Image (cartoon, grey):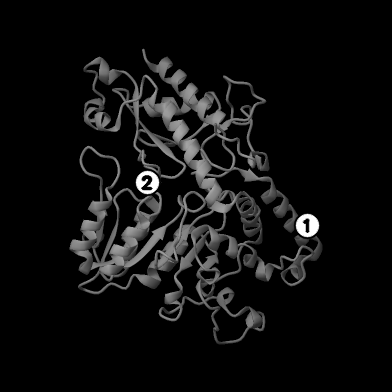
Amino acid sequence: MLSRPSFRDRFLIPTNQDVGAARVNGEDPCVYLCGNSLGLLPQAAEALVQQEFRVWGTRAVQGHHDHPHGREWMNITDHVNPLLAELIGARETEVACMGTLTANLHLMMNTFYKPTPERYKLLCEGMAFPSDQYAFASQAQLHGFNPKDAIIEMFPREGEFTLREEDILEVIEKQGSSIALVIFSGVQYYTGQWFPMQSITKAAKAQGCICGWDLAHAIGNVPLSLHDWDVDWAVWCSYKYLNSGPGGIAGLYVHEVWDQEKPRYAGWWGHDPSTRFLMPPVFSPIRGAQGLQMSNPSVLGVASLLGSLQVFKEAGMVGRLRVRSIELTAHLEELLVRSAYFVPPHEAAMRLPLCNGSTDGAQQRRPAFTIITPSDVNSRGSQLSLLFFSSDTELMQKVWEGLGSYGVIGDERHPNVIRLTPTALYNTIQDCEDAAKFLEEVLKALDI
């Protein structure tokens, strides 16, 4: 028997009426399975942000040094850095709450991507999030290389949807001497594949490569041990599984071995706090990752993140939540594969080429879907990516809109994928059952 999560009532869940779901009771909460895109609002985050508004209104500039709740603005990230470090398996000095995801990615690449004529390539997944792809290409160009030559993109084998560990390790072994930087997503945004981070990091470093990770879909989702895995650096955002709000403040990690090895991109917030406001002319960096801070962080953004991290801490960070995540995701998967419209991945891979607008045969006209997220729980987090196919090239969009009419909020990725994310902190078994039930209703209505 799967237990009901005890933290659901800590979040504000939109009603069906709020999201415009016309086919269900408008007063009931919607089935929100989109935490991989934007997490729900924690009540604690709302309360802390309101507190900071009041401090701003009553203390104004004095809030930097005199705060009624002990969160002086000049030190406010001190409240979140230990919690972030616990989430990613790092030491507090290796973590900095700062910036935005892609800005931090560029900062890390500027710091660690030091190509030479012999070692200049970047190894990544071929379907990295577009912002990452843009960053990789621009960094190669800034260093005088053609991205088509400098970037090694890895794609799944023909007839498969995710990358194999052995294929990644083989490329690292064979081409490692020419690779300057190995940079993958911890969890792949499109397929939901959780990459074998420890083995990739170990293989990359054995070949003399720097290894970094984009944890946007991994932090708060899967267990991480960056320090023990010897990861060089990582970056993340906080508005997905960390529930910090749209555009929430991001963060980065740098292993302590690099503390004295790399030049810093100095800014006043990375300066020693004891003399920061004395405005000395010479930069004196904070030890560790926090010495990379450039500007003062958004107090409202940090307060919102803190509210969510407090819930994580109470819930057991990733340990207990991982158990719940596995239960929920497996239950949703079990329900989906029972669907009359489900096709196993290997069969779907063979049928897909026949569905490009073809009207030849009932098997191609009939709506169908498969799951492209790995079925192995050790290779995925809280996400199932459903790939839809038929001769109707608008099938996915119709399904997504149909689910929305029943109050099931997922995330569409053109041209044919809907991502459903049973998030451990606030989703329920009933959410999974409703999502599977309503998906079946939508597909039946389209099966004409």
Q: In this view, does 74 lie to the left or right of 332?
A: right
Q: Where is residue 275 in the image (x, y as percent from the top left)?
A: 64, 83
Q: Which mark is residue 379?
A: 2
- Give me the C-alpha separation between circle 1 and circle 2: 45 Å
| Cβ–Cβ under 8 Å for marks 1 and 2 | no
Which of the marked residues, 1 or 2, is nearer the chain's N terminus?
Answer: 1
Say if residue 421 shows up in the picture: no
Screen quadrant of the N terminus: top right
Q: What residue type is labelled 2?
A: Ser
Which residue sits furthest bottom?
A: 281
Q: Which amino acid does label 1 sit on?
A: Arg
Q: Which residue is drawn at 49% across and 22% down?
A: 437
Regarding mark 1 in the picture, which secondary structure is present there?
helix
Q: Residue at x 47, y 32 (%)?
A: 331
Q: Which mark is residue 54?
A: 1
Q: Which residue is drawn at 31% across and 18% down?
A: 366
Total numbered badges shown on the rendered structure = 2
Q: In this view, does 307 lie above or below 415?
A: below
Q: In this view, does 395 lie to the left or right of 362?
A: right
Say if residue 267 shows up in the picture: yes
Regarding mark 2 in the picture, which secondary structure is present there?
helix
Question: Which corner quadrant of the image does residue 209 belong to?
Answer: bottom left
